[in-house]
Amino acid sequence: MLRAAPRRAAVLGKPIAHSLSPVLHNAAYQALGLDDWTYAAIECDEQALPRVLDGGWAGLSLTMPLKRAVLPLLDHVEPLAVEVGGANTVVFAPDGRHGYNTDVPGMVAALAQAGVTRPGGATILGAGATACAALAALRALGLTEAVVLARAPARAGDLLAAALRLGMVVDVRPLNAGVRDGDLLISTTPPGAADFMAERTVVSPAVPATVLDVVYAPWPTQLAIAAAKAGIPVVSGGDLLLHQAARQVELMTGRTPAPLAAMRAALDAC
Protein backbone atom coordinates (compact mmCIF):
# COMPACT_ATOMS: atom_id res chain seq x y z
CA MET A 1 0.00 0.00 0.00
CA LEU A 2 1.29 3.46 -0.92
CA ARG A 3 1.59 5.91 1.95
CA ALA A 4 0.08 9.36 1.50
CA ALA A 5 2.62 12.11 0.99
CA PRO A 6 3.37 14.16 4.10
CA ARG A 7 1.24 17.28 4.47
CA ARG A 8 3.40 20.38 4.81
CA ALA A 9 2.32 23.72 6.27
CA ALA A 10 4.22 26.77 7.48
CA VAL A 11 4.05 30.38 8.60
CA LEU A 12 5.72 32.94 6.34
CA GLY A 13 6.88 36.44 7.23
CA LYS A 14 9.83 38.68 7.92
CA PRO A 15 10.95 38.65 10.69
CA ILE A 16 9.62 35.22 11.67
CA ALA A 17 11.98 33.71 14.27
CA HIS A 18 9.76 34.89 17.13
CA SER A 19 6.63 33.16 15.81
CA LEU A 20 4.79 30.75 18.09
CA SER A 21 2.53 29.53 15.29
CA PRO A 22 4.55 26.28 14.88
CA VAL A 23 3.95 25.51 18.56
CA LEU A 24 0.19 25.89 18.15
CA HIS A 25 -0.20 24.08 14.83
CA ASN A 26 2.05 21.15 15.69
CA ALA A 27 0.22 20.73 19.02
CA ALA A 28 -3.04 20.63 17.09
CA TYR A 29 -1.71 18.00 14.68
CA GLN A 30 -0.57 15.84 17.59
CA ALA A 31 -3.95 16.13 19.33
CA LEU A 32 -5.78 15.30 16.10
CA GLY A 33 -3.55 12.30 15.35
CA LEU A 34 -2.28 13.88 12.13
CA ASP A 35 1.17 12.31 12.33
CA ASP A 36 1.95 13.05 8.68
CA TRP A 37 1.45 16.82 9.06
CA THR A 38 4.33 19.23 9.75
CA TYR A 39 4.43 22.98 10.31
CA ALA A 40 7.51 25.23 10.17
CA ALA A 41 8.45 28.93 10.25
CA ILE A 42 10.04 30.31 7.08
CA GLU A 43 11.41 33.81 6.62
CA CYS A 44 9.94 35.28 3.45
CA ASP A 45 9.43 38.78 2.07
CA GLU A 46 7.21 40.10 -0.73
CA GLN A 47 9.80 39.39 -3.43
CA ALA A 48 10.21 35.73 -2.45
CA LEU A 49 6.50 35.08 -1.88
CA PRO A 50 5.54 33.95 -5.44
CA ARG A 51 8.34 31.37 -5.44
CA VAL A 52 7.58 30.09 -1.93
CA LEU A 53 3.88 29.68 -2.73
CA ASP A 54 4.86 27.06 -5.32
CA GLY A 55 6.47 24.85 -2.68
CA GLY A 56 3.84 22.09 -2.58
CA TRP A 57 2.04 23.14 0.58
CA ALA A 58 -1.20 22.04 2.19
CA GLY A 59 -1.58 25.41 3.87
CA LEU A 60 0.28 28.57 4.81
CA SER A 61 -0.09 31.20 7.50
CA LEU A 62 1.01 34.72 6.59
CA THR A 63 2.17 37.53 8.79
CA MET A 64 3.85 40.90 8.21
CA PRO A 65 4.51 42.01 5.48
CA LEU A 66 2.63 39.48 3.31
CA LYS A 67 -1.09 39.77 4.09
CA ARG A 68 -1.78 42.31 1.35
CA ALA A 69 0.93 41.15 -1.04
CA VAL A 70 -0.56 37.66 -1.33
CA LEU A 71 -3.98 38.72 -2.63
CA PRO A 72 -3.12 38.99 -6.36
CA LEU A 73 -1.36 35.61 -6.14
CA LEU A 74 -4.53 33.75 -5.08
CA ASP A 75 -7.18 32.03 -7.21
CA HIS A 76 -10.02 32.45 -4.74
CA VAL A 77 -10.39 34.96 -1.88
CA GLU A 78 -13.19 34.82 0.69
CA PRO A 79 -15.37 37.97 0.88
CA LEU A 80 -14.11 38.89 4.36
CA ALA A 81 -10.48 38.90 3.22
CA VAL A 82 -11.46 41.05 0.24
CA GLU A 83 -13.19 43.54 2.52
CA VAL A 84 -10.29 43.64 4.97
CA GLY A 85 -7.77 43.87 2.14
CA GLY A 86 -5.57 41.10 3.45
CA ALA A 87 -5.36 37.32 3.84
CA ASN A 88 -3.38 35.62 6.60
CA THR A 89 -4.23 32.07 5.51
CA VAL A 90 -3.77 30.19 2.24
CA VAL A 91 -5.25 26.75 1.67
CA PHE A 92 -4.14 24.78 -1.38
CA ALA A 93 -6.87 22.76 -3.11
CA PRO A 94 -7.26 21.05 -6.51
CA ASP A 95 -8.95 24.19 -7.87
CA GLY A 96 -6.20 26.54 -6.72
CA ARG A 97 -5.11 28.74 -3.86
CA HIS A 98 -7.80 29.91 -1.45
CA GLY A 99 -7.24 32.96 0.77
CA TYR A 100 -8.87 33.60 4.13
CA ASN A 101 -8.59 36.05 7.01
CA THR A 102 -8.70 34.37 10.42
CA ASP A 103 -7.47 37.45 12.29
CA VAL A 104 -11.03 38.80 12.35
CA PRO A 105 -12.81 35.77 13.91
CA GLY A 106 -9.75 35.26 16.11
CA MET A 107 -10.03 38.79 17.46
CA VAL A 108 -13.77 38.44 18.04
CA ALA A 109 -13.23 35.14 19.90
CA ALA A 110 -10.38 36.54 22.02
CA LEU A 111 -12.51 39.53 23.06
CA ALA A 112 -15.54 37.34 23.76
CA GLN A 113 -13.36 35.16 25.99
CA ALA A 114 -12.74 38.31 28.05
CA GLY A 115 -16.43 39.20 28.11
CA VAL A 116 -16.21 41.94 25.47
CA THR A 117 -19.12 41.38 23.10
CA ARG A 118 -20.79 44.80 22.76
CA PRO A 119 -18.26 47.62 23.26
CA GLY A 120 -19.63 51.13 23.49
CA GLY A 121 -16.88 52.53 21.28
CA ALA A 122 -13.40 51.71 20.06
CA THR A 123 -10.00 53.22 19.35
CA ILE A 124 -7.48 51.41 17.16
CA LEU A 125 -3.78 52.11 17.49
CA GLY A 126 -2.05 51.73 14.13
CA ALA A 127 -3.27 51.75 10.53
CA GLY A 128 -1.74 48.64 8.96
CA ALA A 129 -3.17 45.31 7.85
CA THR A 130 -4.03 44.18 11.38
CA ALA A 131 -5.84 47.48 12.00
CA CYS A 132 -8.02 46.70 8.98
CA ALA A 133 -8.84 43.32 10.54
CA ALA A 134 -9.64 45.10 13.80
CA LEU A 135 -12.17 47.27 11.96
CA ALA A 136 -13.90 44.15 10.64
CA ALA A 137 -13.92 42.65 14.14
CA LEU A 138 -15.51 45.82 15.51
CA ARG A 139 -18.16 45.58 12.82
CA ALA A 140 -18.86 42.01 13.90
CA LEU A 141 -19.28 43.32 17.46
CA GLY A 142 -21.94 45.77 16.34
CA LEU A 143 -19.98 49.00 15.91
CA THR A 144 -20.26 51.19 12.83
CA GLU A 145 -17.47 53.67 13.60
CA ALA A 146 -14.06 53.85 15.25
CA VAL A 147 -11.21 56.22 15.95
CA VAL A 148 -7.82 55.27 14.49
CA LEU A 149 -4.60 56.73 15.91
CA ALA A 150 -1.95 56.63 13.18
CA ARG A 151 1.71 57.62 13.06
CA ALA A 152 1.12 59.17 9.62
CA PRO A 153 -2.61 59.85 9.10
CA ALA A 154 -1.95 61.05 5.55
CA ARG A 155 -0.70 57.56 4.66
CA ALA A 156 -3.75 55.69 6.00
CA GLY A 157 -5.21 55.20 2.53
CA ASP A 158 -5.34 51.39 2.69
CA LEU A 159 -7.18 51.52 6.01
CA LEU A 160 -9.67 54.10 4.73
CA ALA A 161 -10.30 51.94 1.67
CA ALA A 162 -10.94 48.94 3.92
CA ALA A 163 -13.30 51.01 6.07
CA LEU A 164 -15.28 51.94 2.95
CA ARG A 165 -15.59 48.29 1.91
CA LEU A 166 -16.61 47.35 5.46
CA GLY A 167 -19.17 50.14 5.74
CA MET A 168 -17.34 51.60 8.74
CA VAL A 169 -16.89 55.30 9.51
CA VAL A 170 -13.30 56.01 10.59
CA ASP A 171 -11.88 59.12 12.24
CA VAL A 172 -8.10 59.03 11.65
CA ARG A 173 -6.14 61.08 14.18
CA PRO A 174 -2.43 61.46 15.04
CA LEU A 175 -0.96 59.10 17.64
CA ASN A 176 -0.80 61.78 20.33
CA ALA A 177 -4.54 62.47 20.14
CA GLY A 178 -5.24 60.01 22.95
CA VAL A 179 -7.91 57.41 23.64
CA ARG A 180 -11.54 58.28 24.21
CA ASP A 181 -12.84 57.51 27.68
CA GLY A 182 -14.47 54.09 27.94
CA ASP A 183 -13.39 52.85 24.52
CA LEU A 184 -12.14 49.39 23.74
CA LEU A 185 -8.49 50.05 22.80
CA ILE A 186 -6.99 47.69 20.21
CA SER A 187 -3.26 48.17 19.71
CA THR A 188 -2.19 46.73 16.35
CA THR A 189 1.33 48.20 16.37
CA PRO A 190 4.61 46.20 16.41
CA PRO A 191 6.45 45.43 19.68
CA GLY A 192 7.51 48.59 21.48
CA ALA A 193 5.55 50.98 19.26
CA ALA A 194 2.73 51.40 21.80
CA ASP A 195 4.99 51.93 24.82
CA PHE A 196 4.32 55.66 24.69
CA MET A 197 0.65 54.90 25.49
CA ALA A 198 1.50 53.06 28.70
CA GLU A 199 1.71 55.99 31.12
CA ARG A 200 -1.11 57.80 29.36
CA THR A 201 -3.35 54.79 29.95
CA VAL A 202 -2.76 55.13 33.71
CA VAL A 203 -2.71 58.87 34.31
CA SER A 204 -5.11 60.23 31.70
CA PRO A 205 -8.66 61.08 32.80
CA ALA A 206 -9.79 59.35 29.59
CA VAL A 207 -8.95 55.66 29.91
CA PRO A 208 -10.03 52.63 27.87
CA ALA A 209 -12.55 50.13 29.23
CA THR A 210 -10.53 47.18 27.88
CA VAL A 211 -7.17 46.84 26.13
CA LEU A 212 -6.33 44.28 23.44
CA ASP A 213 -2.66 44.33 22.46
CA VAL A 214 -1.96 42.08 19.45
CA VAL A 215 1.71 41.69 20.44
CA TYR A 216 2.49 38.34 22.08
CA ALA A 217 6.30 38.40 22.15
CA PRO A 218 7.57 39.92 24.32
CA TRP A 219 4.68 39.71 26.77
CA PRO A 220 3.51 41.51 28.77
CA THR A 221 4.00 44.73 26.84
CA GLN A 222 4.41 48.06 28.61
CA LEU A 223 0.87 48.94 27.54
CA ALA A 224 -0.50 45.72 29.02
CA ILE A 225 1.43 46.25 32.29
CA ALA A 226 0.16 49.82 32.67
CA ALA A 227 -3.42 48.83 31.88
CA ALA A 228 -3.35 45.96 34.39
CA LYS A 229 -1.95 48.27 37.09
CA ALA A 230 -4.81 50.66 36.42
CA GLY A 231 -7.35 47.85 36.78
CA ILE A 232 -8.18 47.82 33.08
CA PRO A 233 -8.93 44.34 31.66
CA VAL A 234 -6.27 43.20 29.20
CA VAL A 235 -6.63 40.76 26.31
CA SER A 236 -3.27 39.42 25.14
CA GLY A 237 -1.92 38.90 21.67
CA GLY A 238 -1.47 35.27 22.69
CA ASP A 239 -5.25 34.90 22.97
CA LEU A 240 -5.65 36.34 19.48
CA LEU A 241 -2.88 34.09 18.14
CA LEU A 242 -4.55 31.03 19.66
CA HIS A 243 -8.00 31.66 18.23
CA GLN A 244 -6.86 32.70 14.76
CA ALA A 245 -4.58 29.64 14.62
CA ALA A 246 -7.44 27.36 15.64
CA ARG A 247 -9.45 28.56 12.66
CA GLN A 248 -6.41 28.06 10.41
CA VAL A 249 -6.07 24.47 11.59
CA GLU A 250 -9.71 23.85 10.71
CA LEU A 251 -9.33 25.39 7.26
CA MET A 252 -6.09 23.59 6.41
CA THR A 253 -6.92 20.13 7.77
CA GLY A 254 -10.69 20.04 7.35
CA ARG A 255 -10.98 18.82 10.94
CA THR A 256 -13.39 20.66 13.22
CA PRO A 257 -13.39 21.76 15.91
CA ALA A 258 -9.71 22.51 16.42
CA PRO A 259 -8.28 21.09 19.68
CA LEU A 260 -8.27 24.44 21.49
CA ALA A 261 -7.35 23.02 24.92
CA ALA A 262 -4.27 21.23 23.59
CA MET A 263 -3.19 24.29 21.64
CA ARG A 264 -3.64 26.55 24.67
CA ALA A 265 -1.62 24.15 26.86
CA ALA A 266 1.23 24.22 24.33
CA LEU A 267 1.14 28.02 24.20
CA ASP A 268 1.12 28.32 28.00
CA ALA A 269 4.16 26.05 28.19
CA CYS A 270 6.27 28.47 26.08
Image: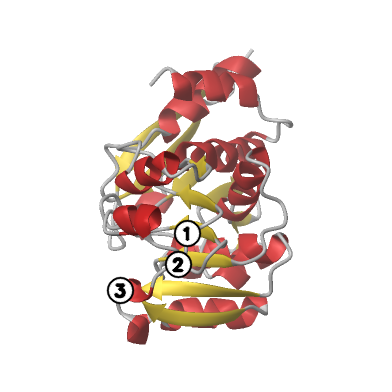
Q: Residue visible at 30% across and 45% down?
A: 222
Residue position marked by numbered label 3 in the rendering = 151
Q: CA distance from mark 1 to mark 2?
A: 7 Å
Q: Residue furthest top?
A: 1
Residue position marked by numbered label 2 in the rendering = 179
Mark 3 or mark 1, earlier in chain:
3
- Residue 13, x across and y down, in percent: 33, 50
- Residue 266, x across and y down, in percent: 48, 20
Q: Which mark is residue 16?
A: none
Residue 259, placed above or below residue 166: above
- Residue 54, x across and y down, in percent: 42, 50
Mark 1 or mark 2, earlier in chain:
2
Task: Inspect the image, locate mark 2, and give the three-letter code of the amino acid beneath it.
Answer: Val
Q: Quadrant of the C terminus?
A: top left
Q: Tell us which disc is closer to us: 1 or 2.
A: 1
Q: Quadrant of the N terminus?
A: top right
The mark tally for this picture is 3
Q: Given contact means CB atoms under 8 Å apart, are the residues at marks 2 and 3 in contact?
A: no
Does residue 100 appear in this view? Answer: yes
Q: CA distance from mark 2 to mark 3?
A: 14 Å
Q: Tell us which disc is closer to us: 2 or 3.
A: 2
Left or right, 128 with respect to 240, comes to left
SS for dot 1: loop
Left or right, 89 with respect to 48, comes to right
Mark 2 or mark 3, earlier in chain:
3
Task: Inspect the image, locate mark 1, and give the three-letter code of the amino acid beneath it.
Answer: Val
Q: Which mark is residue 207?
A: 1
Q: CA distance from mark 3 to mark 1?
A: 20 Å
Q: Residue visible at 62% across and 72% down?
A: 83
Q: Given contact means CB atoms under 8 Å apart, are the residues at marks 1 and 2 in contact?
A: yes
Viewer-side residue, 245 vs 30: 245
